[in-house]
Amino acid sequence: MSKKFICDGMLGRLCKLLRICGIDTLYSNRGTAILVEARKEGRIILTMNTRLRGKEGVYFIENTSPQSQLESVITEYKLQRTIQLFSRCIECNDKLVPTPKVEVRDKVPYFTYKHFDDFAICPSCQRVYWKGSHYKKMVSEIGEILGKLSNTK
Ligand SMILES: [Zn+2]
């Protein structure tokens, strides 16, 4: 089974980066209640909270740069091969559903409809995703990390 995570309140950016990579990640900003939430779903806790350091099922994050945080989590849990960009909603963590172009016609700007062919929708928030400039920006943001990791496999 693939690994699942839950980020604490200080790791919102890391949470989004993990979702961009298609990794199942929840976000919790309710302090130590994160322990209960994590146990309920068998999630690994990613935290900067020193009070949780060393506890079972907790990965303590030392680095303050989100990119470095992502790199350390991917390395620690050997996630390189599970990464699937463009497969999970950045806001809800839900799996995106590939959707025929014609069905998003009224949901995206005309320019987007005209120039892109691959669309996916989040079943929770209905947000439409496509591999446009935003996607390219996300990919370049993490591309460097992924490139570095694939060289050291
Ligand atoms: Zn969503």
Image (cartoon, rainbow, N blue to C red):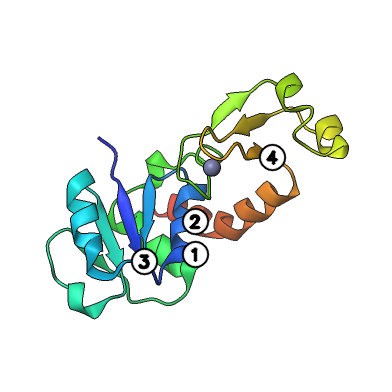
Measured Cα–Cα span from mark 2 to mark 3:
14 Å
Mark 3 or mark 1: name the one nearer the start of the chain: 1
Mark 2 or mark 3: name the one nearer the start of the chain: 2
**Residue 140 point in image, percent of width and height:** 63, 56
Q: Is residue 119 visible?
A: yes
State how many labels appear: 4
Question: What residue did someone put label 4 on?
Answer: 131
Say the numbered circle drawn on residue 16: 2
Question: What residue did someone put label 3 on?
Answer: 29
Q: Say which of marks 2 and 3 sits in front.
A: 3
Q: Residue at x 75, y 49 (%)?
A: 133
Q: Are marks 4 and 2 in contact (CB under 8 Å)?
A: no
Q: Is residue 26 left or right of residue 99?
A: left
Say the numbered circle drawn on residue 13: 1
Q: Amino acid at mark 3?
A: Asn
**Residue 45 point in image, percent of width and height:** 26, 60
Measured Cα–Cα span from mark 3 to mark 1:
13 Å
Q: Say which of marks 4 and 2 sits in front.
A: 2
Image quarter for ligand 1 equals top right
Q: Secondary structure at mark 2?
A: helix
Q: Say which of marks 4 and 3 sits in front.
A: 3
